[in-house]
Image (cartoon, helix red, strand yellow):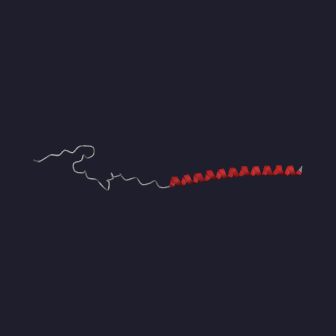
Amino acid sequence: MPLLRTVGRTAVIAGTASAVGGRVQHRQNEKWAAQEQQQYAQQAPPPPAAEEQPRRPAFEPKPAAGLAWEGGSQSRTDAS
């Protein structure tokens, strides 16, 4: 039965190594996350946004002669 003992010992060693490796990885992840959060907190805040001016369209269409504009009707006064 020395073979069975060797297999059992190997399984215990592998299981212990996996558990230790998992704990080390978990601690490193926490450490790195804390460092990243600290670096983010140390960054200067963005400058305050300037008040936005209303944007003018690059092209403003003119109404065609004799047509209603913007849903309203244009009144014409005849100078006769």
* Residue drawn where x is 86% and y is 49% of the image: 4
Q: Percent from the top left, x then y, of residue 48? A: 40, 53
**Which of 64 and 50 lies nearest the eye of the viewer?**
64
Farthest residue, direction right: 1
Q: Is residue 57 left or right of residue 67?
A: right
Q: Percent from the top left, x then y, of residue 53? A: 33, 52
* Residue drawn where x is 24% and y is 51% of the image: 64
Q: Percent from the top left, x then y, of residue 3? A: 87, 51
Q: Is residue 77 left or right of residue 54?
A: left
Numbered disc total: 0
* Residue drawn where x is 47% and y is 55% of the image: 44
Q: Percent from the top left, x then y, of residue 79? A: 11, 48
Q: Is residue 45 left or right of residue 50?
A: right
Farthest residue, direction top: 72
* Residue drawn where x is 65% and y is 50% of the image: 26
**Which of 65 and 43 lies nearest the eye of the viewer?**
65
Farthest residue, direction front: 66
